[in-house]
Amino acid sequence: LTVESKTYKTDETKKITATLKSKSDRPIYGAKVILTSNGRTYAATTDNNGDAIFTIDINKTGGYTAVSTFNDSRFFAATNTTSKIYII
């Protein structure tokens, strides 16, 4: 599970992409990924490229920590990662 840290302006749409791949670097599609930041929780399902796209609602300037989580399934182990969101 990978998520890049991103910087946004206060007035722009804030989309974060979490990419979920197997150990053999193949995309995992149809998986639920959770992103938590600034006291809010967002959920998205991965597409054919393994991308889960979140539109987040943070408009106050500052730096925020985002924790993205994939809970285990029958075939893949649970994983999480931390990234930063900067609002300028």
Image (cartoon, helix red, strand yellow):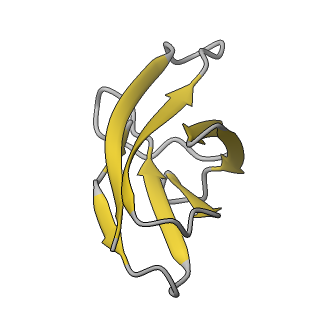
**Residue placed most toward the observer, 42 or 52:** 42
**Above-or-below relation of 48 to 27:** below
Q: Position of residue 58 (x, y in %)?
A: 57, 62
Q: Position of residue 59 (x, y in %)?
A: 55, 70
Q: Is residue 30 left or right of residue 65?
A: right
Q: Position of residue 60 (x, y in %)?
A: 51, 65
**Above-or-below relation of 4 to 22:** below
Residue 66, quarter of picture: top left
Q: Please name the residue shown 37% across and 43% down the image.
A: 26
| Residue 59 seen in render | yes
| Residue 31 seen in render | no
Quarter of the image for the C terminus: give it. bottom left
**Residue placed most toward the observer, 48 or 83:** 83
Quarter of the image for the N terminus: give it. top left
**Above-or-below relation of 61 to 76:** below
Which residue is the extreme one toward the bottom? 11
Q: Please name the residue shown 29% across and 39% down the image.
A: 25
Which residue is the extreme one toward the front? 61
Q: Position of residue 79 (x, y in %)?
A: 44, 20
Q: Is residue 78 left or right of residue 44?
A: left
Q: Please name the residue shown 46% across and 33% down the image.
A: 67
Q: Please name the residue shown 68% across and 49% down the image.
A: 45
Q: Is residue 53 left or right of residue 32?
A: left
Task: Give the mark count.
Answer: 0
**Above-or-below relation of 52 to 9:** above
**Residue placed most toward the observer, 63 or 23:** 63
